[in-house]
Image (cartoon, rainbow, N blue to C red):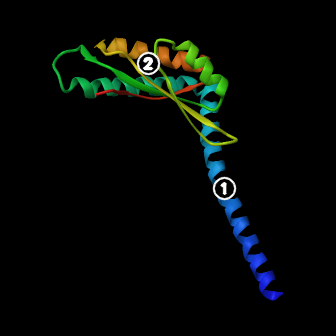
């Protein structure tokens, strides 16, 4: 009788520990996703946009250090983040010229990542900044956040 009671107590402790660890993991994912929503809905959007354009400028500077030419022929990859399946569909329809790959994580509070690649073409700094600004605008209209851009070389 005492053995059965101690086994039940041990199982209860393990179950509580497992529940606590799951709660912590989901709470962390939820806080990341909430940050995404806050960027879209708050006054910080302009700061976010400027930061993305600054990152694009820094990327261009790194790329042009390798060459003397101001125009480069390459492709850029990009990634968006969202929590809503409808946002995934809206972004997919807003960017039909790109083949977007969708990845998700989570069961109840899903987070979606949408990634794609531009065509290989000649780029200038201004063209890159216009393209990034357009991606940010389309992302905002679709309630998605542009997570990053990078050269696809």
In depth, the one of 62 and 77 nearer the eye is 77
Give the image quarter of residue 53.
Answer: top left
Left or right placement of residue 68 versus residue 22 in this view: left
- CA gap, disc 1 and disc 2: 37 Å
- Give percent across and percent down for residue 55: 39, 28
Quarter of the image for residue 88 reads top right
Callout 1 touching callout 2 (CB < 8 Å):
no
> Which residue is pictured at 65% across the width and 49% down the height?
26
Provide the secondary structure element on which disc 2 rests.
helix
Figure check: 19 above or below 76: below
Q: Secondary structure at mark 1?
A: helix
Mark 2, Cα crowd under 10 Å, few <14 / some 14-19 / many 20+, is: many
- State the mark number for residue 96: none
Is residue 123 something one can see in this rendering?
no
Question: Which residue position is annotated with label 2?
Answer: 132
Q: Determine which residue is flagged by label 1.
A: 22
- The answer to which quarter of the image holds residue 81 is top right
Within 10 Å of disc 1 (Cα), the crowding (few <14, some 14-19, many 20+) is few
Whole-percent x, y for residue 18 in the image: 67, 62
Residue furthest right in the image? 1
- Could you say where residue 102 lies in the image, as x and y percent from the top left? 53, 29
Image coordinates of residue 17 in percent, x first then y, are 68, 66
* Quadrant occupied by the C terminus: top left
Location of the N terminus (image quadrant)? bottom right
Query: Left or right: where does residue 143 sit relative to residue 137?
Result: right
* Residue that appears at 36% across and 16% down: 128
Residue 65 falls left or right of residue 43: left
Residue 112, can we see it? Answer: yes
């Amino acid at each position: 009788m005492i053995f059965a009671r101690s086994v039940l107590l041990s199982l209860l402790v393990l179950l509580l520990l497992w529940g606590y660890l799951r709660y912590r993991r989901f709470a962390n994912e939820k806080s990341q996703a909430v940050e995404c929503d806050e960027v879209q809905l708050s006054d910080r959007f302009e700061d976010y946009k400027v930061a993305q354009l600054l990152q694009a400028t820094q990327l261009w500077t790194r790329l042009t250090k390798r060459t003397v030419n101001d125009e480069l022929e390459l492709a850029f990859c990009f990634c968006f983040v969202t929590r809503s399946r409808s946002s995934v569909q809206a972004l997919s329809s807003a960017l039909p010229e790109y083949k977007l790959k969708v990845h998700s994580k989570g069961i109840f509070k899903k987070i979606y990542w949408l990634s794609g690649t531009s065509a290989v073409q000649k780029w200038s700094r201004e063209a890159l900044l216009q393209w990034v600004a357009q991606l940010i605008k389309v992302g905002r209209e679709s309630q998605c956040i542009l997570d990053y851009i990078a050269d696809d070389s």
